[in-house]
Amino acid sequence: MSPRQAVVRLWNGLPEKQGSRFIGTAFFIASNTLLTAKHIVNKYPVIYLDGVPGGGKDKIDPENIILCENRDVAILKVSISYDDVSPLCLTSKKFAMPQTVTSMPFP
């Protein structure tokens, strides 16, 4: 699985419903956990994922959104485990200059 397959789109409503809005992206860090930016999700009571493995959609209720107090980070817990996803690895290593960093927007 490519890293792009670990990335999903975030919506403030069901993607096919009129009035829903694309608000950003998140990526899997475990089979049932995603990471995104806090500023993307902190304004919306319910978040929907689009582009999850298998082509489905998933709803994230407010109690499953964890906002980091001092960082622009949010953790999203999904209701089911997507065992066929390859989570992106996070590292605790410090970056040294010069070092290449890859940024991937949603395709």
Image (spheres, rainbow, N blue to C red):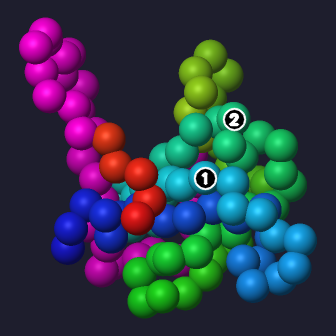
Asked whether residue 79 appears in the rendered view, the answer is no
- Residue 21, percent across and down? 77, 63
Q: Residue at x 49, y 47 (%)?
A: 35
The N terminus lies in which quarter of the figure? bottom left
| Pick the front one: 11 or 42 | 11
Q: Residue at x 75, y 85 (%)?
A: 16
Asked where in the image residue 99 lies, by quadrant, the reply is top left
Query: Is 75 above or below relative to 7?
Result: above
Checking the image for residue 24, the label placed there is 1
Asked whether residue 36 appears in the rendered view, the answer is yes
Q: Is residue 52 left or right of residue 21?
A: left
Q: Residue at x 33, y 78 (%)?
A: 83
- Residue 68, percent across and down? 62, 29
Q: Would you name the residue on which mark 2 appears?
A: 39
Checking the image for residue 69, the label placed there is none
Q: Is residue 83 left or right of residue 105?
A: left
Question: Label 1 crowding class (10 Å Cα cut-off): few <14, some 14-19, many 20+?
Answer: some
What is the secondary structure assignment of the residue under circle 1?
A: strand
Magenta segment: 75-102
